[in-house]
Structure formats: C-alpha cells, structure tokens
Image (cartoon, coloured by chain):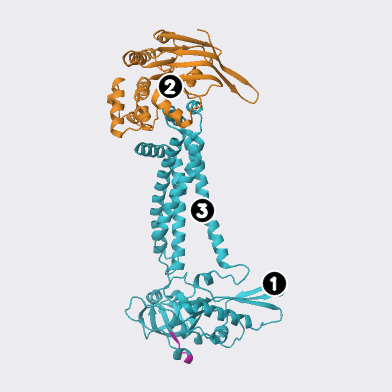
Amino acid sequence: MIRLQNIEKVYRTDTIETLALNSINLDVARGEFLSIMGPSGCGKSTLLNIIGLLDLPSKGAISISDQKTDHLSDKQLAQFRNKKLGFIFQSYHLINDLQVLDNVELPLLYRNTTAKERKMLATEALEKVGLANRIKHFPTQLSGGQRQRVAIARAIVGRPEIILADEPTGNLDSAMGNEIMDILISLNRNEGTTIVMVTHDENMAHKTHRLVRLFDGSQVQ
Amino acid sequence: MLKNYFKIAIAVLRRRKFFTFISLFGISFTLTILLVLTSFLDKIVGDSYPDHKRDRSLYVSRMSEIRKDNGINSGPLSFYFFDHYARSLKTPVKIGITNGANNTNTYVNNKKITVNYKYTNADYWDIMEYDFVEGKAFTKQQIDRGDKVTVISEDIKKEYFGDVPSVVGKYFEADNIKYRVIGVVKNVPVTSYMTYSDIYLPYTVAKSDFTKDKGYSGVFFGILLANSKADVPRMQAEFQSMIQRLPMERKEFIKIACHASPYIVSYVDTGDDNRSGVTMVLTAVGIFVLLVMLLPALNLVNINITRIMERSSEIGVRKAFGASSNTLVYQFIVENIILTLLGGVIGVVLSFIAIGVINSAHLIPNLVLSINFTVLFIGLLICFFFGLLSGVYPAWRMSKLNVVTALKAQ
C-alpha cells in the first residue's frame, strides 16, 4: 500500500545541514494500522509528512497504491492527496470561521460533488464519530475531544484509503484519547482503512498492528 | 464552492474588524473621491446651460505676449481687441464679449449682499440661450444708449427682492447705481466661468470706458459663433491668421500667442504655446487618479498579505485536503473581490451622501451635482479590477506556501 525506499531528508541552512531522516525503508500493507514512535525531534512528523506528500524527501522514492509519487505536479499532488489520503493533526487544524459541517465538507469541495452530496456525506461522517447533533456549531464551541472527532470526520469524509494521524491524542486527556483511538481502530477494522499514526503514547501504540521506532532520523525497530 | 468562499470571506471580514474597516474605508473613500470629482468634471464639461451652441463656437480666453527675454505677459483681452480685430473676421456670425464676474456689495434692509456682476455686449445674448423666467435680455440699442438696465439671476432676485412674483421694472442697486431689471434668468453654476453671474450689465454702463483702451490686454473673453459646425475649422484658421498679422504692441515683444479654441481647451488654456493646458490638465488628472487609486491598492495588497498570513493554517489544511495552488489563488481572489465590491457599494452610498451634502450646503453657487451613472459603472468596474489586482499578488504568494510550514504557523 505504502512503500518508502531509502528515504532521506536533509534540512539545509546557510551554515548547517541537519539530517532529519536517514535511509528509511518501510512497507505498509493495505488495511494495516501502523504506529510510529520515538523521542521528540527524531523525525516522526517529518516521516509522516513525507508519506502524506506534504513534504518532499531529499532522496529516495515513495509509492502509494502502486503509484510512484515523484514528478507529480502541484495539481496532481493535490488531487492525489484529495482522493487517497486523509489527515488528522494533533492541534486539529479546523477552520474556526466555518461551522462543523462546512469543516467536514472541505475535502469534498475539491471534487466534483454537488452541495447536496457534500452535505449528505459530511453528515454521515459526523454520525460515525457521534457528532451529528453538532453540525451547526463552530469549532470554538466544542471540547478538544469533540474537535478531534470533527477532524476525524473531515479525514474520512472523502473515503480515503489511507489516514495519516499526527499525534491525534496528544492534546487530549486519557479518556478522550481512548475515545479517539477507539474510533480509529473501528475505522481500520470495519472499513479496512490503512492508518499510519505518530504517537508518544506507548499504550496507544500497542493497540496498533505494528510499531516502528525512530531515533535520530533512523529506523531502529 | 462559491458559497463556501463567500461564507469564509464574510467570517474573515467580521473577525478583524479594524483591518476590514481600513480596507473598506480605502476602497469606498477612493470611489467616493472619484465619483464626486467626475461629477464636478461632468458638470463643468457636460452641462452647457446656457451655452448650448458650443459645437459651433470658439472661445478666446487669453492672450500671451512673449518678450525677448522669454518673459510672458499673459491675461484676458481688451474689449477693443474683440470689437476691432475679431470683428474684422468674415466667418464668425456673432462675437459675444463678456468679462469674468466681479463682485460688489449691496444692502437690502441693512443686510449685506455680495453681488457678482459682469458686462456683456448684445451678441452675447444672441449666442447664449439663457432661460428667462421673466423679461428679456438688453438690446443693442439699449447698450448703445448706455441704459442702466440689468438681467438678474433667479437666486439674486429672491435674495434681493424676496418672494415676489415679478421684478421686471423694479430697480436693483449695486455700487450706488440703480439698474432697472429687464429680465430674470435661471441660475448658472459658478464653474461656467464665462456665463456665470448674479447680474448682467451692458458694457457701456461701466465706470471706465472699455472702448477707449486700444491695447490688446484687458478683462474680456470672447465667444466666436460660426454659422455652422462645418465653419468652425475655417473660423479657427482665420482667427489664427489674424493673430499672426497683429502688430507687436511694444518693441520688446517678439511673439503673440492667442487661440480661438473649443470650450474645453479654452477652459484650461495656459496662454503658453509650449505648455498646452490640455496636456497639463490630462497629466495632472492622470497622476491624481493614479495616486488616488494606487495608494488604496497598495494598502489593500499589504493588508491582504497580513490577512492571508494569519490564515496560513487554513492554507495548510486546504492544501493537505486537496486544494492546488491555483484553487487557493482563485479562492483568495474571490474573497478579495467580495471585499472590494462591498467597499464599492459603500463608496456609492457615500458618494450620494457627499453629493447631497455639497448640493444642500451651496458650497459652490448654483452648482447642482449629480452622479454620472457611466462613472458609477466604471467606478465599480475599477473596484472589481483593483480587487483582482490587490488580491492576486498576496494570493499567489500565499498559495506557494509550503504545507508543513503553513500548518506549523498556527
């Protein structure tokens, strides 16, 4: 499903070169729930951004669903992300000026869908995360757990094959974190969605199928 | 998708009210200035009352005598110049002679009234088509006899005589001379400098005898009327040829420059052949309009960059979920156009208010401004264009933002 070959990421400034990722080789199978762990600054988020085609590697190749992603144009990358990938961020990244329903509809705006279809799909996604009664609310009127559930609804509304979650429980207390984790596990089990999750939390990581550990940009497990 | 953009545009406008105020103020104020300015120009250029024969008239407003040291004596002309030299031309069928309005004070019931007065000849009344509320203009015979008669404007009639139905036959005192009112005309705006006045007098009743001075310079303007529009170029050429034959008044003069020009050209005549008034006015208006439009546009670009920078997290999210750079440029431009059009609508409302205030305050005598709908349409079009322009650069810049950087910016 996801294949990373010899991925390297170097950040360059005028005076310093920092090696953020070094020779990462990783295969993620369809339907797998993989977690990535490691200390702060070890390159977990960088790796997730590269898998999500939000950032480019300095070296190496990525293929997703048997499709090579290098040489894709800005427009092609946008379409690829829109159809294949869904993102969940630690700080939710909801648009506070838009109501919950509009936030969830966002990925569908970049597809050929009618307003009616968008509303139907977004409501359906919100039902899955138990927030169908909050569609008219603004993000600032919700708790942290509710916001993250909205973010999950936004990630799944376009029915992507892969969900990339960057510390989805990082800003939540353990009860809410467990709730979010349960939703992700159910998505993986019931819908067969492939999930790659970055986490600091060993307990959460152990709920996934496989754990990859990074240290100083290199894969150690 | 447009509905979504509209929603977010309105939300963004409401979020930072001060920025919104600055943006909207810039746009609406600019449009107001343009609309009021063009309303003035429209009045000056477009409103021809009582000068309805402009298409077959030429105007002589000043003469310049250039000295050997390149100095210039420039100003209006003498009555003699028009009555003697211009009168010798064959093409003009009428030569109206008048001066710019002067003012004097008069008293009614111990109340001081400032009265603008001007002198005219008889042809002036044949060329100009004043609307007479009552009475008529003075005749050549009355002028030749030096009859102390006057034609007055509606406004001064009301101010001097009060609300009375008729004043023809009554006397109007100005400068300790009593003039018999023989006609009342509808008001002329002060911007029509050749035709505006409160009272009109025969040139023969002036304290100084204008016919005595045989020099070229004086206080008068002339209006040459051709028989038809087709005769105007011939009349202009004939006038120019007459000017070239004019003898120099003094030894130190080397050249005389004087033109019979269409109304607009004469309005801005500098009297200097090397500095065309039209070019100068067009340059000045061009620079003014450019500055007036450019400053808010730059301001908008700046504000837009700040506004959009604040939304870098949103840009990151949109890109992550499938928006291409072009889609984002489109979104921000649409938002900006909504903002500028909103500013445009406010500008139109402000213009109506400003023009209403100017009209009701009588800042400029007899000038009734009105919105020119062509200008309004062009103004809104300009707003749309500037909305596009001031939105493109910030939008393009922000659309190139790296997704990861954008997401981290929150």
Label annotation for residue A89? 2
Image x and y of residue A47, in percent: 50, 18
Q: Which chain is cyan?
A: B
Q: Secondary structure at mark 3?
A: helix
Q: Residue B116: within the magenta?
A: no
Few, some or many residues within 10 Å of mark 2 (<14, 14–19, 20+) = many
The image quarter containing residue B46 is: bottom left
Q: Colour of chain A?
A: orange
Q: CA distance from mark 2 to mark 1?
A: 79 Å
- Is residue B219 in view from this perspective? no
User: Do marks 2 and 1 share a subunit?
Assistant: no
Seen at 48% across and 31% down, the residue is A74
Q: Is residue B163 visible?
A: yes
Distance from the alpha carbon under mark 1 to that under mark 3: 36 Å
Q: Earlier in the sequence, mark 1 or mark 3?
A: 1
Q: Is residue B80 left or right of residue B34?
A: right
**Magenta residues, start to end:** B144-149
* Tag in front: 3 or 2: 2
Q: Residue A187 location in percent, x, y?
A: 34, 16
The subunit letter for the residue under badge 3 reads B
Q: Which chain does tag 2 point to?
A: A
Q: Quadrant of the N terminus of chain B?
A: top left
Q: Where in the figure is residue A173, as x and y percent of width and height?
A: 39, 15
What secondary structure is marked by label 2? loop
Which residue is under mark 1? B70
Against B105, is B296 above or below? above
Residue at image point 48% right, 38% down: B395
